[in-house]
Image (cartoon, rainbow, N blue to C red):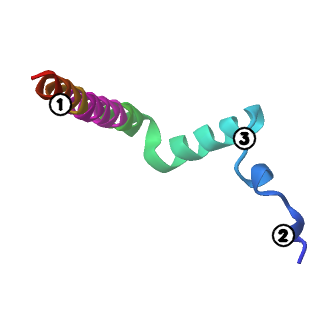
Amino acid sequence: MAIATITPQLLLSMPSGGEWITILLVVVVLFGGKKIPELARGLGKGIREFNDAKEGIKNEIETGANSTKEADKK
């Protein structure tokens, strides 16, 4: 019953300074110092690919909108 009274905003808040330190320590313990650069590289590559895909979709939408405007002018 007590969990129902907690607002959802409190459950989705960002970690504070001490919590980030704890998270980083757990990551170092689980993966070790040698694996962290590989994980960061993989994460960066994934973010880059996501952004490229997002830009590609945006360009396709803009191209479709522009071709529709040109077809309406004729």
Position of the C terminus by quadrant = top left
Q: Which residue is mark 1?
A: 68
Secondary element at tag 2: helix
Q: Residue furthest bottom?
A: 1
User: Residue 23: image x %, image y %?
Assistant: 62, 43
Residue at figure coordinates x 45%, y 42% from the top left: 32
Crowd around label 3: few <14 · some 14–19 · many ≥20 (10 Å): few
Q: Does residue 13 show up magenta in the picture?
A: no
Disc 3 marks a residue whose amino acid type is: Glu
Q: Magenta residues? A: 43-60
Q: Name the residue carrying label 2.
A: 3
Q: Are marks 1 and 3 in contact (CB under 8 Å)?
A: no
Identity of the residue drawn at 44% across and 46% down = 31
Under circle 3, the secondary element is helix
Residue 44 belongs to the span the image colors magenta: yes
Viewer-side residue, 37 vs 55: 55
Answer with left or right where residue 6 lies relative to residue 28: right
The residue shown at (53%, 44%) is 27
Res 34 → quadrant: top left
The quadrant of the rendering that contains the N terminus is: bottom right
Q: Residue 11: x, y in percent? A: 74, 54
Read off the residue under disc 3: 19
Q: Residues within 10 Å of mark 1 (few under 14, many from 20)?
A: few
Q: Considering only order in the chain, which callout, 3 or 1, is on the residue closer to the N terminus?
A: 3
* Mark-to-mark CA distance, 2 and 3: 21 Å
Q: Relative to 69, does residue 20 appear above or below in the rendering? A: below
* Amino acid type at image mark 2: Ile
Give the dominant element type of the magenta stretch: helix, strand or loop: helix
